[in-house]
Image: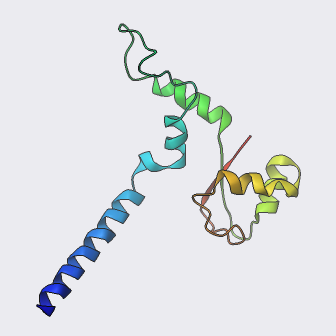
Amino acid sequence: MQKDFKIGLGVGLLFVVAVAFWLSTRPDLSTEARVLHQSPNTPSIAAQSEDRPVTPNIEQRKSSVEQTLRIHVVEKGETLSAISAKYYGSPNQWPRIVAANRESLNDPNRLLPGSKLVIPQ
């Protein structure tokens, strides 16, 4: 009985790790994709007429999001204050960056080089 429990626990753990890896590599779960999906320029399906396609033009959505969305790749030694000063002209605007990246920033005092931050307008 104990051996079966260990095997089941190992298989379950392996399954959880595999699903976590799969979810972390999905491009449609990225910040850019979520913003594209929630774009205010995207017409709802109910508002579309029958002669128009259900899927909106992806290029139009990308261009509208690129105009409003800025992404910063963190380099070694950078701080939120320095990034804030670069984009806003003031190091005191770092809480705006933290608020926009609440899901991806575990600790605002420890930025990982190579991580991507959304810089709100």
Residue in view at x 57 percent, y 58 percent: 103
Which quadrant: the N terminus? Answer: bottom left
Q: Residue 49's spot in the image, x, y percent?
A: 41, 9
Looking at the image, residue 1 sits to the left or right of residue 82; the answer is left
Q: Residue at x 37, y 20 (%)?
A: 54
79 to the left or right of 19 = right
Q: Say above or below: 114 vs 60.
A: below
Which quadrant would the C terminus be assigned to in this image? top right
Question: Quick one: 38 or 110, which is closer to the camera?
Answer: 38
Nearer the observer, 99 or 68: 99
Does residue 15 sit above or below 94 in this rendering? below
Residue at 83% of width from left, 47% of height from top? 88
Please state the horizontal and vertical placement of residue 22, each as a whole percent of the image: 34, 59
Name the outermost residue toward the front.
1
**The furthest residue to the bottom:** 2
Residue 76 screen position, x and y as percent: 69, 69
Q: Quadrant of residue 12?
A: bottom left
Question: Is residue 100 rendered to the left or right of residue 58?
Answer: right
Q: Position of residue 23 (x, y in %)?
A: 38, 57
Q: How is the image coloured?
A: rainbow
